[in-house]
Image (cartoon, grey):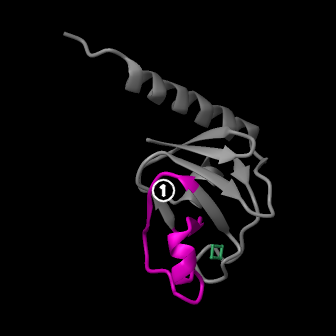
């Protein structure tokens, strides 16, 4: 499980390992401005403030420049979190469009976080 913190709201979202940021946020009932969903348009660019990610498929240099790759810019439709991430959307706000999915995700995240901090049984 990865926890994604979306700034500036501080919204915390559970993302399953292997899911892209976009897929994870959508599974959790959230939406924001996206375009092609295939790494071709760059509309889904976000800023990663903390944490690591990798791309599940190659991303063209015409979509993400070398400079952007080093400054924390990422394509959320292709980026897979390697650990917990803190991100910030650009020119878009995160909208909860499916409250039921949002509640299911919040419960899963709380259970996973409780499991992380539980003392080991002897
Ligand atoms: S939505 Fe087009 S590159 Fe991500």
Examine the image and state in which quarter residue 71 appears.
bottom right
Q: Which residues are magenta?
A: 49-78
Residue 32 vertical position relative to residue 74 in the rendered view, above or below: above
Q: Quadrant of the C terminus?
A: top left
- The N terminus sits in image quarter: top left
Kind of element beneath mark 1: loop
Residue 113: x %, y % from top left? 47, 27
Closest to the observer, 87 or 22: 87
How many C-alpha atoms fall within 10 Å of the one at disc 1: few (<14), some, or many (≥20)?
some
The residue sitting at 53% across, 32% down in the picture is 109
Q: Is residue 71 inside the magenta stretch?
A: yes
Counting from the top left corner in percent of width and height, residue 34 is at: 72, 68
* Residue depicted at 55% across the width and 79% down the height: 67
Ligand 1 is found in the corner quadrant, namely bottom right
Q: Position of residue 53 (x, y in %)?
A: 45, 60
Residue 41: % across, % down: 67, 82
Q: Is residue 34 above or below residue 110?
A: below
User: Which residue does the image show at 52% across and 87% down from the upper left?
Assistant: 61
Residue ID for mark 1 = 19
Q: Nearer the viewer, residue 111 or 81?
A: 81
As drawn, is 3 to the left or to the right of 118? right
In the drawing, does residue 99 fall left or right of residue 109?
Answer: right
The residue at the point 71 percent across, 36 percent down is 100
């Amino acid at each position: 499980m990865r926890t994604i913190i979306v700034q500036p709201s501080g919204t915390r979202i559970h993302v399953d390992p292997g899911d892209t940021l976009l897929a994870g946020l959508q599974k959790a009932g959230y939406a924001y401005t996206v375009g092609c969903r295939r790494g071709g348009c760059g509309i889904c660019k976000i800023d990663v403030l903390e944490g690591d990610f990798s791309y599940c498929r190659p991303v063209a240099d015409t979509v993400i420049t070398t400079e952007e790759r080093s400054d924390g810019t990422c394509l959320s439709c292709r980026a897979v979190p390697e650990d917990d991430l803190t991100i910030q959307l650009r020119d878009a706000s995160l909208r909860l469009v499916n409250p039921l999915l949002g509640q299911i995700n919040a419960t899963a995240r709380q259970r996973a976080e409780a499991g992380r901090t539980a003392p080991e049984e002897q």
